[in-house]
Image: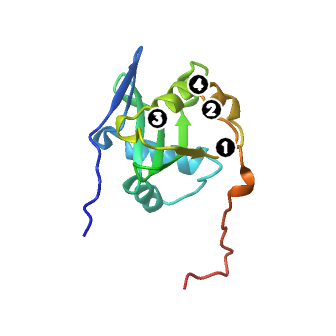
Amino acid sequence: MIPPFVPPPASWQRDDYLLSTDPGLLEVDWVHHQLSQHCYWAKDQSKETTLRTLACSLPFGLYTQQQQVGFGRLITDYARFAYLSDVIIAPEHRGKGLGQWFARCVTQHPELSGVKRWMLATDDAHAIYQRAGWQAVTEPNRLMEFRPTANEVAP
């Protein structure tokens, strides 16, 4: 059996803000509330779904004065691929460059230095990610997706 890889926590500091991958710092209820109530991509998702997504990815929490004000997670193999998902900055902390800083720090995680393909999807934050060095997919014809319909059942 292959043991799971669990990287040591990493953190970055900017002014009064701390970005950390320490799962012990996460305010899970805050994360779930933000996702299920304020994010179009996870609207009304169950707490169980939130917990599963946290358990199966590398979480990044953003904090100030020991309160969580942001979140995002990476779905990654820590070697070749990383997908940034569920990025949230509380409304009262937006407009301070935190999203750009967050998107840049994620790519600088010491355990992800070998990753060559970083991806994310966004409907409305392209400019934020572009300022952090992200760009549109150069060969979109190579990418595919599968979206199961309600009637499809896994074999």
- Distance, label 1 to label 2, CA atoms, is 9 Å
For mark 2, give the secondary structure: helix
Q: Is residue 147 left or right of residue 18?
A: right
- The tag earlier along the polypeptide, 1 or 2, is 1
Q: Residue at x 24, y 70 (%)?
A: 1
Q: Is residue 69 left or right of residue 120?
A: left
Q: Which mark is residue 94?
A: 4
Q: Which mark is residue 122?
A: 1
For mark 1, give the secondary structure: loop
Q: Residue at x 39, y 35 (%)?
A: 109
- Distance, label 1 to label 4, CA atoms, is 17 Å
Do callouts 1 and 4 mark residues in contact (Cβ within 8 Å)?
Answer: no
Dot 2 amino acid type: Tyr
Read off the residue under disc 2. 129
- The tag earlier along the polypeptide, 3 or 1, is 3
- Distance, label 2 to label 4, CA atoms, is 14 Å
- Distance, label 4 to label 3, CA atoms, is 18 Å
Pick the front one: 154 or 76? 76
Q: Mark 1 or 4, which is nearer the eye?
A: 1
Dot 1 amino acid type: Thr
- Distance, label 3 to label 1, CA atoms, is 16 Å
Q: Is residue 86 left or right of residue 128?
A: left
Local packing at callout 3 (Cα closer than 10 Å; few below 14, some 14-19, many 20+) is many
Q: Residue at x 35, y 40 (%)?
A: 111
> Toward which corner of the image does residue 149 lie, by quadrant?
bottom right
- Distance, label 2 to label 3, CA atoms, is 11 Å
Q: Which mark is residue 46?
A: none
Dot 3 amino acid type: Val
For mark 3, give the secondary structure: helix
For mark 4, give the secondary structure: loop
Do callouts 1 and 2 mark residues in contact (Cβ within 8 Å)?
Answer: yes
Read off the residue under disc 3. 106
